[in-house]
Image: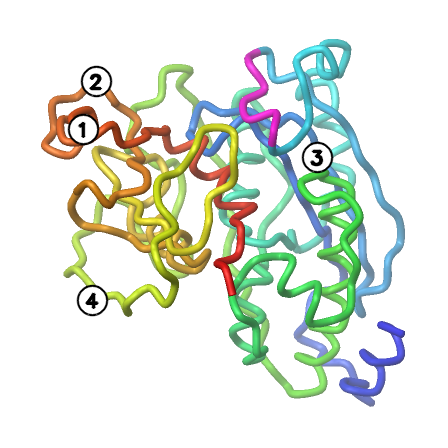
Amino acid sequence: MLEDRATAVSSPTQWPTAYPQGYAVVDVETTGLARDDRIISAAVYRLDARGEVEDHWYTLVNPERDPGPVWIHGLTSEALEGAPLFPDIAEEFSARLDGRVLVAHNAVFDWQMIAREYARAKSQAPVRQRLCTIALSKELGLPLPNHKLESLAAHFGVVQQRAHHALDDARVLAEAFRPSLRSAAASGVRLPLLECLPLTEWSETPRIGHQASGGYGGYRPGSWRPSRKRPACPHPNPGRYEEGKRLKQGMRVAFSGDTSVDRELLEDRAVEAGLHVATSLSRLTSLLVTNDPGAGTSKTVKARQYGTPIVDEAAFGQLLRDVEPADG
């Protein structure tokens, strides 16, 4: 059914010669979002120039640290104990990526995690360009309610079997990317390809707030930008976040202190997930996100006074991947 729909909607008689000759659709699960977080599983679907699947590959990776939010990805320390270290799988991973455009959903995140792992292993990933399926869906003008993978999959009739499992997420993305690619080819859309710059050095004690490579879609960490007036959140505030549960659309989220991911990008992701980004903290705030809960900033002080839940950036990033829809 998906193949029929993709063919009917977009079957270019002549494939654009400027398009890449192959793609590596990638998904990685990680211990979090910070610069010192680690990959715990990785999957690659290799596609030909027209988006047809050639093969796929999956591996667990021992992060040599706590696995992070197990309730999201399901990978416990016990499950990862006997898994290979990243240097042990780096060569095979490279073979899967070599000469192809890396495709991922929010590709800057996957690329940065991969580049950092290779840098730790004193090597480089053989990737020169990446393509973000969020950016491609915007180029195509797809009528999506948000930029979540499940929304893109639903648009093309792709069924998710195991969300937040690297192999199934990569499969879902590969199946959604194929009709997207064909639609782009049929319409003569220029693919939103971005350069992948490898890390040339690595510090095991990264500085909070420093990002190793360029931002997403023109974002540059540390550059000044005037504040933007965001549209009002369309969902009512369901109350405070409860530990161990999902975020829910409409929750008011405040940020304090430095973040590894560019702050504006992090806020954009929260808004796209249906959350209300608050510039100040009040009794109505559902959650405070900070990497330094012990800091004496006005927001952290008020959070302690009001009993507002606090999570770090890594945990928040994982929670963003599975936000509960608003009631009604």
User: In the image shown, does 230 or 88 lie closer to the viewer?
Assistant: 230
Q: Is residue 151 left or right of residue 92?
A: left
Residue type for callout 1? Thr
Contact (Cβ within 8 Å) of mark 1 with mark 2: yes
Residue 74 appears at what percent x and percent y? 68, 28
Q: CA–CA distance between discs 2 and 3?
A: 34 Å
Contact (Cβ within 8 Å) of mark 1 with mark 4: no
Give the magenta-colored segment's residue range. Answer: 65-71
Q: CA–CA distance between discs 1 and 2?
A: 7 Å
Residue type for callout 3? Ala
Residue 5 appears at what percent x and percent y? 83, 80
Q: Residue at x 45, y 23 (%)?
A: 36
Residue where numbered disc 4 is placed: 229
Give the structural element (helix, strand or loop) at label 3. strand
**Can you tell which of label 2 and label 3 is closer to the viewer?**
2
**Can you tell which of label 1 and label 3 is closer to the viewer?**
1
Instruction: Tell me which numbered mark, 2 or 4, is placed earlier along the sequence.
Output: 4
Give the structural element (helix, strand or loop) at label 1. helix
Residue 49 appears at what percent x and percent y? 79, 66
In the rendered view, tell whether residue 31 sits above or below residue 255: above
Q: Is residue 299 left or right of residue 323?
A: left
Instruction: Tell me which numbered mark, 1 or 2, is placed earlier along the sequence.
Output: 2
In the rendered view, tell whether residue 51 sits above or below residue 88: below
Residue where numbered disc 2 is placed: 294
Instruction: Tell me which numbered mark, 1 or 4, is placed earlier along the sequence.
Output: 4
